[in-house]
Image (tube, helix red, strand yellow):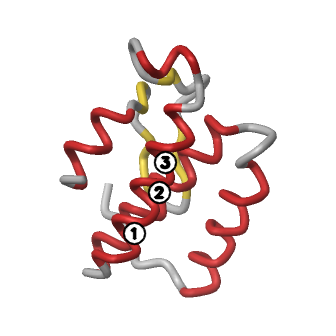
Amino acid sequence: MRMERVTKKELENLKEKVLELGTTDPKRAAAHAYALAVHYKKRGESQYMVTYAKKAVELLEKLSSEKLVGCAMNEKSCIEGVTIPPILSARMIKTKFKI
């Protein structure tokens, strides 16, 4: 699937979602942060890519199960054109974004 370039407004909406979900649903917040990191990587904005990749890792590491196997997503998920892996783990994110 080809990922279309998102608008600045869509990026802002994703950022708001990360903040909104950060305390109530860290798993979903991590998925949104991962999507942001992917979009910023595609745009060549490495500073923001690293920021949101690290945010996703931080959120996942707060979940006790993450430390062992990763965080299973409840359903196949796509956020703003980014397919979220079925198992989203801190290790995978660190490897993908070289952080």
Q: Of helix, strand and loop, which one carries label 2?
A: helix
Pick the front one: 81 or 98:
98
Which label was assigned to residue 27? none
Q: Of helix, strand and loop, which one carries label 1?
A: helix
Pick the front one: 43 or 98:
98
| Dot 1 alpha-carbon crowd within 10 angstroms: few under 14, some 14 to 19, many 20 or more | many
Could you tell me which residue is drawn at 28 percent across and 36 percent down?
A: 92
Single out the mark in the foreground, 3 or 1.
Answer: 3
Distance from the alpha carbon under mark 1 to that under mark 2: 6 Å
Single out the mark in the foreground, 3 or 2.
Answer: 3
Is label 3 in contact with label 2 (beta carbons under 8 Å)?
A: no
**Residue 24, position in %: x, y?**
80, 40
Is label 1 in contact with label 2 (beta carbons under 8 Å)?
A: yes
**Residue 72, position in %: x, y?**
51, 21
**Residue 67, position in %: x, y?**
43, 19
Q: Pick whichever of labels 3 and 2 is earlier in the sequence.
A: 2
- The amino acid pointed to by label 2 is Ala
Could you tell me which residue is drawn at 59 percent across and 25 percent down?
A: 63
Q: Which residue is mark 2?
A: 35
Relative to 95, does residue 18 appear above or below in the rendering? below
Rendered image quadrant of residue 9:
bottom right
| Dot 2 alpha-carbon crowd within 10 angstroms: few under 14, some 14 to 19, many 20 or more | many
Which label was assigned to residue 39? 1
Q: Which residue is mark 3?
A: 56
Distance from the alpha carbon under mark 3 to that under mark 1: 14 Å
Q: Pick whichever of labels 3 and 1 is earlier in the sequence.
A: 1
Q: Of helix, strand and loop, which one carries label 3?
A: helix
Is label 3 in contact with label 1 (beta carbons under 8 Å)?
A: no
Name the image quarter holding the N terminus: bottom left
Q: Is residue 52 left or right of residue 95?
A: right
**Residue 84, position in %: x, y?**
45, 42
